[in-house]
Image (cartoon, rainbow, N blue to C red):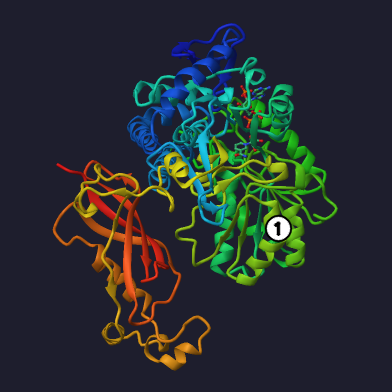
Amino acid sequence: MSIIAVSSYAAGHWIPPGAGARPVESAVTGEVIAESGNDALDAGTMLDYAREVGGPALRALTFHDRARMVKALAMHLQEHRALLYALSHRTGATMADNRIDIDGGIGTLFVFASKGRREMPDGQVYLDGPVEQLSRDGTFLGQHIHTPLLGAAVQINAFNFPVWGMLEKLAPALIAGVPSIVKPATATGYVAEACVRIILDSGILPDGALQLVSGGLGDMLERLDAQDSVAFTGSAATARTLRATPNLLDAAVRFTAEQDSLNASVLGPDATPGTPEFDLFVKEAAREMTAKAGQKCTAIRRIIAPEAQVGPLIEALSARLSKTVIGDPARDDVRMGALVSRAQRRDVLDKVALLDAEAERVHGDPDAFAVTGADRERGAFLPPMLFRCDDPDAAVRVHDTEAFGPVATVMPYRDIDHAARLLNRGKGSLVASVVTRDGETARALTLASAAWHGRLYFNNRDSMAESTGHGSPLPHMVHGGPGRAGGGEELGGVRAMLHHMQRTAIQGSPDILTAIGGRWVPGAAEIEAPAHPFTRPFEALRIGETIHTESREVTSEDIAHFAEFTGDTFYAHMDDAAAAANPFFPGRVAHGYLLLSFAAGLFVQPDPGPVLANTGLDSLRFLKPLPPGERLAVRLTVKHKTRRNDDYGEVRWHVTLTDGAGDRVAEYELLTMNAFGT
Ligand code: NAP
């Protein structure tokens, strides 16, 4: 079989392996199947290309354009994923593992694409929080904004998820508008390289948006500046080395690390044998130990159980683990494949020897286990191994040794406080899980240990059918943890995009803030609408276009009629004396919802036209009560527009209701869907 030449993609060209290339072995057969690396790769040229070609091309697009691009990439990869499945088996991954890595990576692209379009503007500036009132009359205001960094995002990934690991970092950078230089781990880089080829061949990305380093980074980290960033995933040891690169410190380059951690799972006191929770715990723990042959940064390494349940739990877990068919990952009947390499297997066995000193191995013998469809000695196979540590307070290794394979240690706890102390002995983890149906247990553990964990995952019979798994980072939720886990953060919806952007406090007049943010700010110029804005197609409406309506009187009869019609006979609308006794009302007042309805009656243009639907309102505040006999008028202003598709877009209107004295009675943002003109 020919050797795969794992290439890099630099400044628009594929560069095959060259001087300094390293051999890569198959996890299953131990044969050399690929070579990767080229010392001649020019990091300076790659960075220039990202900064001068990729960055400007991406930044010329809006968040929505870039999110659509990411969705197109996801669809394209979905069509071509069979090629990746086949390659990935050679890394030791079963089909179930491929679903996590390859399908999970593609799914992550879809989620970010959707978040980018739904939660970010169709523009180039992301507004962070509301306008801040910095002056009495509102002529000088503040607004926090985010704009993309002007450099390159260097993304260094671990070997265990060559596709997901790359895509979960790439998607947020692309949507933010920052070009990426990705560096997969050499051991599985041939899968990542194939994925990058599929992406680049699609032609979906602008030139320079994505470059690939297969092999070493050369002096790239020495060339970064404060507009660049490094996102690292891998071991704590490598993170420590890279973090200390003098130039990263000198130039204050953003550096985030997602590293290893000793994730734990707690069996709740209520989850006794015979309950659905006990069975669920056994199932999840076994799955976490065997998925990706335990090579998951989030895998359960420490199992914390009530003293009385340690024995039954080990028995049930061992019974389940003994059913794990180990072998050729391409076979349908195999449940656990190989570790990535024989070097990785040696590393795991070295770590197991450390655990041996403090804990007793109660399941799995690395010298005696069956392998189906492959040669046990040539491939990097190991069985699931379970340890029991009866004195976890005195033990050290079980809390700080990550055996990056199918290995976990069971330990007892006396009470919830003790369970929390053991959870926190990992000194910072990506995820901790608790199987319990008891809200008090969940709350107590949260208060005692959430600060040490990036994610807390609770599961029980009510959520188990739809729960996503202890070990699955989701694009919607943050991934990363304090301390030992690296102190970094990724994913978490729009938060992930913001890691690639600079937050800047903008101060200025309402007109200046409106011009920068693309969102009308009260106090900014009102543009006189040439016709009623409800008659104007989406593309014609300008930000700031405003109408002021006629006023109408709100009578006691109106209030009585509304009360009777709706059934809302709250005393403040019905009984003058009772209302006056209330500190908020001068006497009887109109219903807030009556005012909203009258407001619609005042500003609506009734004929069929571009306004297709009223889809809601945001930020409603009733500011001043309106007594009967007062007059009501409305100002309606185009605040913001978001194109949804080729047919229509969302218009956000700023609506202000005023009384006869011109005081604000209510304020809100109205949302409508408006058609484009034909
Ligand atoms: P690793 O040895 O630390 O390598 C991680 C990445 O760093 C690889 O791409 C590696 O490239 C690169 N690297 C190593 N030395 C470097 C240097 N001097 N300069 C630039 N790059 C360098 O980790 P691994 O063995 O691939 O992955 C296993 C570890 O990752 C486990 O400890 C696991 O817990 C952790 N992990 C954490 C997460 C998370 O999200 N927190 C996810 C997955 C894995 P080469 O391969 O070319 O050396």
Q: Give percent across and percent down for residue 518.
A: 40, 42
Q: How many marks?
A: 1
Q: Nearer the viewer, residue 617 or 556?
A: 556
Q: Is residue 604 visible?
A: yes
677 displayed left or right of 403:
left
Towards the viewer: 255 or 84: 255
Up-down relation of residue 320 to residue 442 (above or below):
above
The quadrant of the rendering that contains the C terminus is top left
Specify whether 439 is left or right of 87.
right
For image coordinates 27% across by 62% down, the residue present is 549
Q: Residue at x 52, y 51 (%)?
A: 129
- Percent position of residue 394, x then y: 85, 53
- Left or right, 625 with respect to 368, comes to left
The answer to whether residue 313 is left or right of residue 564 is: right
Residue 423 spot, x, y in % from top left: 72, 55
Residue type pointed to by label 1:
Ser
Q: Is residue 475 visible?
A: no
Neighbourhood count class around disc 1 (C-alpha, 10 Å): few under 14, some 14–19, many 20 upward: many
Give ligand 1's quarter of the image: top right
Residue drawn 56% across the image and 10% down it: 41
Image quarter of residue 149: top right
x and y, in percent, of residue 517 in the image: 44, 42
Residue hosting label 1: 449
